[in-house]
Amino acid sequence: MACKVGEVARLARVSVRTLHHYDAIGLLESSRRSEAGYRLYTAADLERLQLVLLYRELGFRLEDIRDLIADPAFDRREALVAQRGLLVTQVRRLEAMLGLIDKTLMAQDEGVPMIREEMFEVFGDFDPAEHEEEVEGRWGETDAYKESAHRTRRYTQEDWARHKTHGDAVNAGIAALMDEGVPPGDPRAMDAVERHRLLIDEWFYPCSHEMHAQLGQMYLADPRFTATYEKIHPGMARYVCEAIAANVARAAGERG
């Protein structure tokens, strides 16, 4: 039986105004209307609302959630598996933070100074300036580098955190496919690495399919990139590279 907007608001613990806003921006529209014109939410609408609220808890912006769900390749089960992966990562991070606080309290109570590296070991492992000199040396004269430098110059710490959240979601989705045994040439894997390409395109520089293929090769050739992906899922660097190659071939076929 369909629910009225007030019932949904109480059920989901959100305000009616929030539901009206979700409707207005095309994020969650009620599937039906009563004879009197009131919004009626079906079971499918409630499932979509659950996904929206989970993404919100993970820090996604409403516009990004809308675009994700509107993607023709969107799959609810894959999204739930990816969300679970993100939450597991967050739980581990929070546990590490609690451990650090306990160590810090113990050190303070015992009057023993902590090792400097130990004080900061649990904080984010993404440092956009870490390889800045090397990157500029290798690609400093390219249009892609100049565009990336132009964009990232304006990014705040909050922007980088949001980028990491989106990147983690993409990687969790790929890892979930690997766990299911989906081959890299499968359309679902190609769709997953296409989201990876679009993330680069949105945040750093225009990333064509051909450029993405070069990046895929670099993920295998450069041990640092390989190690990053291997930490997420064993064999992931090769899987991503092969899925990118399949996606490039698919795009070429569609253009031809």
Image (cartoon, rainbow, N blue to C red):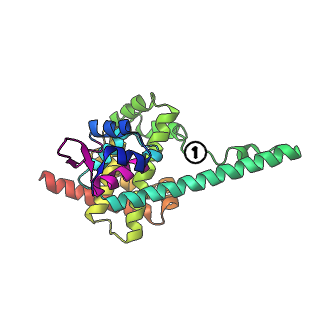
In magenta segment, residue 31: yes
Q: Residue at x 77, y 46 (%)?
A: 104
Mark 1 falls on what kind of element? loop
In the depicted structure, whether residue 159 falls above or below residue 255: above
The region drawn magenta spans 27-55
Q: Residue at x 66, y 48 (%)?
A: 121
Q: Residue furthest right?
A: 111
Left or right: residue 234 versus residue 29 is: right
List the residue tagged with mark 1.
Answer: 124
Measuring from the top left, give residue 57's x and y in whole percent: 47, 46
Left or right: residue 183 versus residue 35 is: right
Q: In front: 93, or 76?
A: 76
Left or right: residue 169 versus residue 248 is: right
In the depicted structure, whether residue 150 falls above or below residue 223: above
Q: Residue at x 64, y 54 (%)?
A: 95
Q: Residue furthest front?
A: 36
Q: In front: 121, or 213?
A: 121
Any part of residue 221 in sight: no
Amino acid on which the number 1 mark rests in the picture: Gly
In magenta segment, residue 250: no
Q: In front: 250, or 122?
A: 122
Q: Quadrant of residue 63?
A: top left
Number of marks in picture: 1
Q: Quadrant of residue 173?
A: bottom left
Measuring from the top left, give residue 119's x and y in whole percent: 72, 44
